Amino acid sequence: MTCHTLTRKLRLRAASLLGSSLLAVAAIGVSGVTFSSAAFAQEADEGRQFDAKSGEAVNAALTQANAGDHGGAVNTLNNALNLPDLNAYERSTMYQMLGQYSYELDRPADAQRYFESAINSGGLLPNEVGNIRVVIAQLMIGNGQYREGATRLENYLNSGGQEKPQYVELLTNAWVQAEDYRRALPWAEKWFNRASPKERRHFNLLNFLFNNLGMQGRQADIVKEMIGRWPEDKTLWDAWASMLANGGREQEAFEVTKMLYLGGALNTESDLLKVVQYYSFYEMPYQAAEILEREMGANRISRTPERLKQLSGLFRQAREYKRAIPILESAASQSGDAKLYADLGEALYNEGECERSEAAFTQAINRGYDAGKSWMLIANCRYDQTNTLERLNCDMSDAEMAAAPITRARASAVEAFNKVPSSSRERRNASKWIQFITAEKEAIDNRCVFERNVERDLCYQKIKLAYDSEIFTGGFKLEDQNCLKFKADYDAEFRIKITEDDG
């Protein structure tokens, strides 16, 4: 066998072996990427051949490697590198084989170093150097050196290297692993645009990158396209609603969430609570309460004191106090929480159930709730009852006024206002209420005094006229009989004096 023939066979076998072994590198770091073989199968040129000794060593290494003895092949080649007068081509080929076998031995760092030496030996053609640079970049990426490997692979492609689909995918994933999403994006878009057919993973990657780069508009476009392809995927709808909300389009996000709920796509407690929150946020507390109550009844939302409090709060916002009261009673009795008792007292106050309201506020005060706020509402409830009672009128006697239900209700309210602690911030308002109620009673008294004085003065005039007309009428004749009740007072004040003067 001539040296030329041996060299050609070695190149062909090395190319085949290197190519098959490098396919295994595809599993490093990113799945689905394959490496192409270096282009070794070329015609021998001047200086690109083995002599007898180096050829024998290389042949022995190939034989060992084919038998699965990659460690022996590495030792054989390392010894061969010490042969005198090796040319650049021989060294480059041996280093490539060492790189391949080191990789087979799961020594990626050694493999990388040997491939670097293959380039530095100067025996490779430009296209071979490019191929080895790709292999080195892949090894670096597979070894966790994502940024360095991606930079090398990107430099190779940007300098005119063949832009194979597997290189684009590997480069995309390498930049993603390096968390340099901005450099990953243009390669990801190439990978996406060239994919046929497009799979879910292609969409997922662009969605991920747009999200991390804050490109909400483009992310919205890709998610809309994904929804069109996979409308049954609830996570896409959730993402769509979230993007709308984060983009200031809360109303549209609400509509999406509402559609999912009505379509039966929302089943988890967190999703259902989100629906309740949306209805509440958009000032539909009654609808929110209806949903929350229904889902608690279906055991899809837990019936905890906190949820009962939320439900009662929604009914109270909707002014459905009667529906809020039993819920608050249940929540308060379960938890013993002072604030819940206070909320119950307020709900009962709004329904005008003052006795029950006062009992609830008493429970709240005993559990440490603000006594000032509690007594203010108790007092207000007592006072509000005066609106349902018969008003005082000036036809009543002082005793009748004092015994009237409205008078007792006012006194009860004043008593409650007086129980607001002096240290409370509500004390000033309580004092104003006491002044108001007192002034209200004084106003009634003053009005009655005024009305009585007006009537008395008018009757006094009629009585005087009747006395003055006695000479013509033949005696005292009072036309307005209602004024008779004032005649004794008139006589005592005026007629006795006249008689005394005449005497």
Image (cartoon, rainbow, N blue to C red):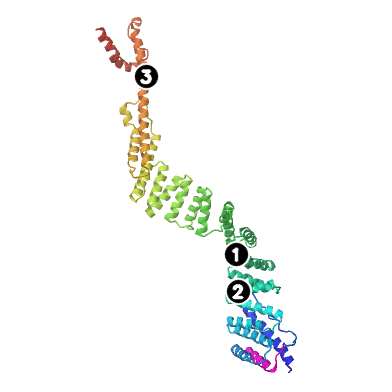
Q: Residues within 10 Å of mark 1 (few under 14, many from 20)?
A: few
Amino acid at the residue labelled 1: Phe
Which numbered mark, 2 or 3, is in the foreground of this view?
A: 2
Residue underneath mark 1:
208
Which numbered mark, 1 or 2, is in the foreground of this view?
A: 2
Residue 455, image x, y percentages? 37, 19
Q: Is residue 50 above or below residue 186?
A: below
Residue 485: quadrant of the picture = top left
Q: Are marks 2 and 3 in contact (CB under 8 Å)?
A: no
Find the residue positioned furthest to the left. Answer: 503
Residue 80 shows in this picture: yes
Q: Residues within 10 Å of mark 3 (few under 14, many from 20)?
A: some
Residue 459, image x, y percentages? 36, 16
Residue 461 located left or right of residue 288: left
Secondary structure of the residue carrying tag 3 is helix
The residue range painted magenta reads 48-67
Marking on residue 455: 3
Residue underneath mark 2:
148
Secondary structure of the residue carrying tag 1 is helix
Q: Earlier in the sequence, mark 1 or mark 2?
A: 2
